[in-house]
Image (cartoon, rainbow, N blue to C red):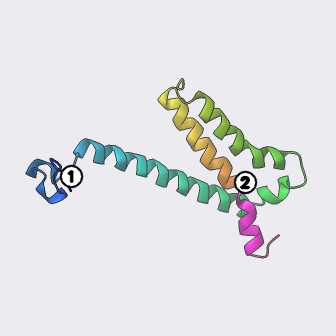
Amino acid sequence: MGNDFAGHTAPGDLPRRWEGGNFGLRRYMQRVYKYMAGGLMLTGVMAYGGAASGVYTAITATPLFWIVLLAPLALVVLLSWRIERMSAAAAKMCFWTYAALVGLSLSGIFLVYTWRA
């Protein structure tokens, strides 16, 4: 029976220069996580603001409610079709718009769980 892993090194056997990892990748991923955290914060602020200000209750009886509810799905479809041809600024704007619309569409959760509905 032969050794199928001949020539492969164990993780502890890697050269010393790799112990710190790839710093460029680390910085890039930190930026990605900062954008995602910012998007989550914007979503939460919009959800709370929509519920606390009464905007969500004001639009529930109008057709605008369905636009707010389905707009995040439309942005997901737009991003999936156009992301390769979009500029970075346009993609960021779509991301921030998506985060805000998801927050507004989830405002009803605050109303349901705080008995304000």
* Number of on-image labels: 2
Residue 99 falls left or right of residue 59: left
Q: Mark 1 points at which residue?
A: 5
Q: Residues within 10 Å of mark 2 (few under 14, many from 20)?
A: many
Residue 35 falls left or right of residue 83: left
Q: Of the residues under marks 2 and 1, which one precedes in the sequence?
A: 1
Q: Are the residues flagged by discs 2 and 1 in contact, CB closer than 8 Å?
A: no
Magenta part of the chain: 105-114
**Main secondary structure found in the magenta portion:** helix
Q: Position of residue 71 (x, y in %)?
A: 73, 42
Q: Identify the residue at horizontal 55%, vertical 30% (top origin).
A: 83
Q: Identify the residue at horizontal 60%, vertical 35% (top origin).
A: 80
Let me know if residue 20 is in the magenta part: no
To which quarter of the image does residue 50 belong? bottom right
Q: Where is residue 88 in the image (x, y as percent from the top left)?
A: 48, 30
Depth check: give the residue in front, 53 or 69: 69
Q: Name the residue under label 2.
A: 105
Q: Which residue lies furthest to the right in this view?
A: 61
Figure quadrant of the C terminus: bottom right
Depth check: give the residue in front, 64 or 26: 26
Q: Residue furthest left?
A: 16
